[in-house]
Image (spheres, grey):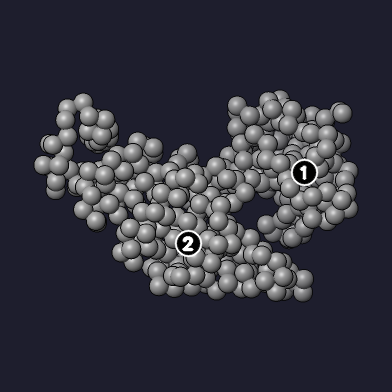
């Protein structure tokens, strides 16, 4: 089967990112179709310098309409869609064509969403995201904002099951970094557009989830909580199980706003619904820790370590299946007086993430408070070497 691949994108004033995005795929796609919705900077010029075909589409308030305009022009057998603030991982781009299977209609990639001040591989949310689909099968985007493919409709048409393969392609997304968000005032724009969407009679409960997410990003937890609950109710009224990331957001809001009593024991129901979702288990561990149920919390953090964080079917925070539960397990062990075991957990957590400072600080305090415990560890002992290694590395870092 021929596998011509079209890149389809929509852009507006993206001169900061678009070059890196196109550079990442230019050698591996057959055409680049870019719909510009009214750029006033050098975006169009940059796109054309990469050989892209730029279509001008007057902005009508709908991201889906703009994307669908590009799809109509695509000649490839398959379509890859990206946003301007994304790029395909350099080591994966050459596999783009190889992963397109004869029996597949739609494929997911590993989307890595960075958050915080600057890109840090330990500060990401990871998920499988549908980015590759067969052309001329009826796929199109729906929803004016946070547009998504009409996958259910197409799967029904072709009598396919809804299991979508995730291919080994990583896509890095930088649009949620604080400087980008603040510069574009994305949250305010999105809330305004999403609230317009709520005026439609047939709006999706996803709309309220997205409003909740935007309020959460703005630290407006009361509004976020209200909308995420409306979203959960919306799915239940449609006789559908609310998607896992709604529960993730709900308990994240409760924890961030200090409502641990409000989160207990409801978190157990969420964990029962999605027993393979490590983030929910991690939240349960945090709630138990705050409630001073240290022994139970240790069991939950151990389970997080068993689950790991490789399950991309759920939106997963980097670290909740590795360095985060190790650190909190150390906190619990310290509380119950198991100082040497706590130190080992802190050291292991610190060794897994060079930018996660909490375990290093906890280890330093522990060493000062319990010098005798560490003095008792023999020279060359594995635990002693690990602990000394972490602390000396931190001294080096701070002396620069």
- Looking at the image, can residue 332 be seen? yes
On the rendered structure, is 67 left or right of 378?
right
Where is mark 1, residue-wise? 106
Q: Residues within 10 Å of mark 1 (few under 14, many from 20)?
A: many
Q: Quadrant of the C terminus?
A: top left
Q: What separation in Å lies between label 2 and label 1 (alpha carbons)?
A: 31 Å
In the image, residue 38 lies at what x, y percent? Answer: 72, 50
Does 357 appear above or below 153? above
Q: Residue at x 22, y 29 (%)?
A: 381
- Disc 2 target residue: 252
Q: Quadrant of residue 71?
A: top right
Q: Is residue 302 left or right of residue 73?
A: left
Q: Who is closer to the viewer here, 58 or 94?
A: 94
Image position, residue 386 (x, y; %)? 27, 32
The location of residue 260, given as percent across then percent down, is 40, 69
Judged from the image, the secondary structure of the residue bearing numbered disc 2 is: helix
Dot 2 or dot 1: first in sequence order is 1
Left or right: 188 as drawn, with respect to 328 = right
Task: Say whether residue 41 is visible.
Answer: no
Residues packed near mark 2 inside 10 Å, few (<14), some (14 to 19) or many (20 plus): many
Split into 4 quadrants, where in the image is the N terminus?
top right
Q: Which mark is residue 280?
A: none
Q: Residue 373 location, x and y as percent?
A: 15, 42
- Closer to us: 354 or 388: 388
- Which residue is painted at 62% across and 40% down in the image? 110
Asked if 379 appears above or below 150 in the picture, the reply is above
Q: Give the image quarter of residue 91.
A: top right
Query: Where is 290 relative to 91, above or below?
Result: below
Residue at (48% x, 73% y) in the render: 222
């Amino acid at each position: 089967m021929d596998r011509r691949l079209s890149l389809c994108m929509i852009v507006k004033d993206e001169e900061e990112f678009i070059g890196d995005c196109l550079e990442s795929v230019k050698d591996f796609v057959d055409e680049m179709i870019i719909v510009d919705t009214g750029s006033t900077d050098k975006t169009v010029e940059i796109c054309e310098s990469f050989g892209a075909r730029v279509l001008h589409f007057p902005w009508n308030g709908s991201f889906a309409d703009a994307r669908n305009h590009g799809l109509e022009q695509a000649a490839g057998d398959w379509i890859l869609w990206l946003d301007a603030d994304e790029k395909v991982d350099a080591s994966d781009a050459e596999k783009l064509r190889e992963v397109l299977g004869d029996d597949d209609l739609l494929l997911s990639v590993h989307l890595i969403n960075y958050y915080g001040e600057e890109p840090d591989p330990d500060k990401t949310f990871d998920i499988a995201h549908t980015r590759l689909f067969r052309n001329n099968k009826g796929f199109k985007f729906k929803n004016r904002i946070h547009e998504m493919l009409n996958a259910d409709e197409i799967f029904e048409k072709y009598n396919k099951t809804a299991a979508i393969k995730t291919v080994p392609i990583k896509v890095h997304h930088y649009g949620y970094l604080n400087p980008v968000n603040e510069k574009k005032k994305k949250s305010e724009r999105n809330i305004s557009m999403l609230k317009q969407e709520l005026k439609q009679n047939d709006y999706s409960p996803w709309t309220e989830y997205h409003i909740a997410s935007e309020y959460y990003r703005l630290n407006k937890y009361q509004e976020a909580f209200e909308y995420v609950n409306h979203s959960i109710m919306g799915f239940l009224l449609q006789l559908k199980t609310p998607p896992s990331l709604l529960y993730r957001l709900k308990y994240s809001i409760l924890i961030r706003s200090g409502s641990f009593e409000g989160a207990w024991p409801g978190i157990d129901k969420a964990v029962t619904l999605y027993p393979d979702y490590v983030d929910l288990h991690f939240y349960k561990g945090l709630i138990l820790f705050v409630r001073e149920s240290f022994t139970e919390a240790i069991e939950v953090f151990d389970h997080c370590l068993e689950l790991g964080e490789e399950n991309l079917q759920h939106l997963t925070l980097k670290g909740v299946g590795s360095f985060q539960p190790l650190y909190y397990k150390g906190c619990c062990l310290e509380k119950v007086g198991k100082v040497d075991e706590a130190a080992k957990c802190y050291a292991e957590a610190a060794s897994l993430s060079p930018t996660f400072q909490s375990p290093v600080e906890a280890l330093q305090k522990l060493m000062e408070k319990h010098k005798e415990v560490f003095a008792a560890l023999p020279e060359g002992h594995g635990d002693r070497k690990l602990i000394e290694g972490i602390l000396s590395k931190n001294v080096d870092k701070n002396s620069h």
